[in-house]
Amino acid sequence: MTVPPTGLLAADRAYTDQITEHFAQRVRTLGYQLILDYKQQHRGVQGTHQGALLVDGSLACPAMPHALAHATTGLNDKAVRDLADGTELSERIAGREPYFLKLKESADERGSIRLQCPAGGPSPAVVCPRFNQVHRVPAPRPAVVDLSDKRATAAHTAAKPTVPIPQGERLRPLPQAELPRICQKPTITIRPGALGKLDKFRQDRHYLHPTWQDAYRPERANIEGLNGRAKSHGIDISDPTKRLAHGRVAQTILLALMICSINLHILFSWQQTTRPQTTGTAHEIAPLAGSASTPPDAAGLPPPIRLEIRETI
């Protein structure tokens, strides 16, 4: 059974480097999709799983061109922050897209997903001589393409990138048993924690791709704004003199109270900005519920006389 994701969870590099069982595996089990950033030494090719390359948190074709797979290897943080369209880096990030494994089945109730070789399926993203040889894919029939139709032109086989298979393998194909697992069978199942230590790097958006930037940067900007508020002069959770207590338990409780105060201040500020503004015009006073709308009858009974009791000594 496929369940909808709980939501997106963007985390900075401190969370990315956590042990898989402590963070990534747990949030995936809860249904979250992870959006991650990496330290400089962790960018680029991070490992392999069932023959597929793990490139910046996304599984990809094992024959992805070297320049694309290592486009971010050793990339510093400034280059990540200042990534702009039209640069060599942005072009290589876009060039990676066809080589990533395609999502065939979304996460089920256990967080498992199914991924597919980019050369497989009814709409392959690449042309792979290895895939065609292993799975006996017949050659496509000649077809007339309307060059004015961009969608039809992009869908044609000639418009798709070809996986760079070594020349020796083209002349003498390898036995199927010697091929990577993803090349033998075009689909694989990925469960939370299946990649072992590498699972902490896996994420649900392709790193630095526009979809990643649209999801990660607004979330991180919001978090940094909250961090700035927490470290402002009003609260300043970084000032130890405002938590004069001994012991981890006492410090944790005081910090929780400070965070609670910050949340209350945020709610108060939101209420002040969203509340309708009052004008300077006079307002009529509404009568109280149950009060008399007409003056009392003059012929009615007078109020009871209150007796005073005086004591004399």
Image: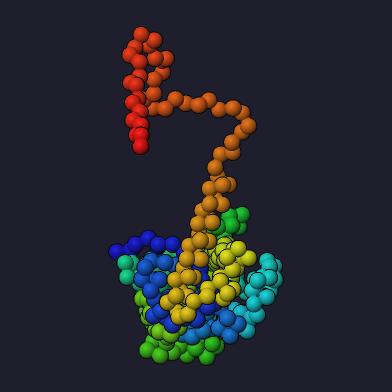
Which residue of the protein is positioned furthest toward the front in this rendering?
313
Residue in front for this viewpoint, 164 or 255: 255
At 35% from the left edge and 31% from the top edge, which residue is drawn?
310
Compared with residue 44, is residue 295 higher up or lower down, i.e. above or below? above
So how many labels did they put on this image? Answer: 0
Question: Can residue 2 be seen in the rendering of this structure?
Answer: yes
Q: Position of residue 168 (x, y in %)?
A: 52, 91
At 43% from the left edge and 85% from the top edge, which residue is drawn?
197
Compared with residue 145, is residue 204 higher up or lower down, i.e. above or below? below
Residue in front for this viewpoint, 244 or 229: 244
Q: Is residue 248 left or right of residue 111?
A: right
Compared with residue 149, is residue 119 higher up or lower down, i.e. above or below? below
Which residue of the protein is positioned furthest toward the top in this rendering?
299
Residue in front for this viewpoint, 278 or 140: 278
Compared with residue 69, is residue 115 higher up or lower down, i.e. above or below? above
Q: Position of residue 215 (x, y in %)?
A: 54, 63
Question: Can residue 209 be seen in the rendering of this structure?
Answer: no
Q: Quadrant of residue 22?
A: bottom left
Q: Position of residue 180 (x, y in %)?
A: 42, 85
Residue in front for this viewpoint, 271 or 303: 303
Q: Quadrant of residue 21?
A: bottom left
Q: Is residue 94 left or right of residue 28?
A: right
At 38% from the left edge and 27% from the top edge, which residue is drawn?
289
Q: Quadrant of residue 298?
A: top left
